[in-house]
Image (cartoon, rainbow, N blue to C red):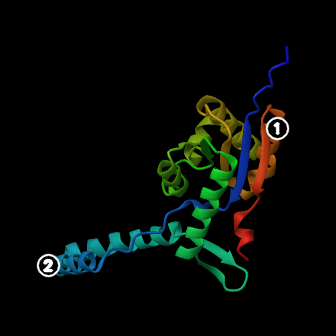
Amino acid sequence: MAARRREVSKAYFVGVRHSWQCLPHPEGTDEERERASREFAELSEEAMEQQLRREAERLQLHEILKPAIPDPKTGLRAITPEELAAFDTFLRNAMHRCGIKEILEEACGPPHVRIAALGQELGLDHHYCEISKEEREKRGIKTKEQREQYWLSVLRATVRQFPLLVICGADHVDSFGGLLRVSGYETETLVADYETTIF
């Protein structure tokens, strides 16, 4: 009787900078902008001042969250819609080619929702494996190694099907991949830093 082959739990890695995990900020339609202008014109002077202060705070947050990359030719610039579409296509093709069943992502939720949305579109289970800085402080997680150990615990607790796609910071691909290998998983890096493929 031939021995049954052991099923290998394999993880495919894609390294990114976190701006690739965000969706572009919606700018709104012409009708929405016109309605906002009318409403703004009807405000009292005090209410107008408060609204301007809130809008300034929102715009500052928008600039922080806007997907951007350090272009070696032009400096920091927004990721173009075409580049984001190409990234989505790259991920769809990789998931199809590798037979991906689930996704593990180094993020803890908004604004990092691009990969989760793609997983939902493709009918794949998606798991965030990171926690906020505040939660890390509460748990005494201070080092890169401790963070990656936590991600491994999330993987073990949530992932049920392989092959798995792991989306993580480019600076974690080698170390987290190594941790998975010593923990009994097989790994393959599809791209260590996606951004380097467009320059």
Front position in the image: 100 or 14:
100
Q: Which residue corresponds to the image point at 67% horizontal and 47% vertical from the top-left?
A: 166
Q: Mark 1 sits on what residue?
A: 181
Q: As shown in the figure, which amino acid type bears the numbered disc 2?
A: Glu
Q: Is residue 120 above or below residue 159?
A: below
Discs 2, 1 touching: Cβ within 8 Å:
no
- The quadrant the N terminus occupies is top right
Q: As shown in the figure, which amino acid type bears the numbered disc 1?
A: Arg
The secondary structure type at the circle numbered 1 is: helix
Q: Mark 2 sits on what residue?
A: 42
Pinpoint residue 38: horizontal percent, then vertical percent: 18, 80
Q: Which mark is residue 72?
A: none
Q: Which residue corresponds to the image point at 70% horizontal and 74% vertical from the top-left?
A: 198
Q: Is residue 130 above or below residue 64?
A: above
Q: Answer few, some or many: residues within 10 Å of disc 2's Cα (few below 14, many 20 plus, some between 14 and 19).
A: few
Q: Residue furthest top?
A: 1
Pinpoint residue 50: horizontal percent, then vertical percent: 27, 71
Pinpoint residue 141: horizontal percent, then vertical percent: 67, 40
Which one is in front in this view, the residue at disc 2 or the one at disc 1? 1
Pinpoint residue 5: horizontal percent, then vertical percent: 81, 25
Q: Is residue 75 above or below residue 55?
A: below
Can residue 6 be seen here? The reply is: yes
Front position in the image: 95 or 150:
95
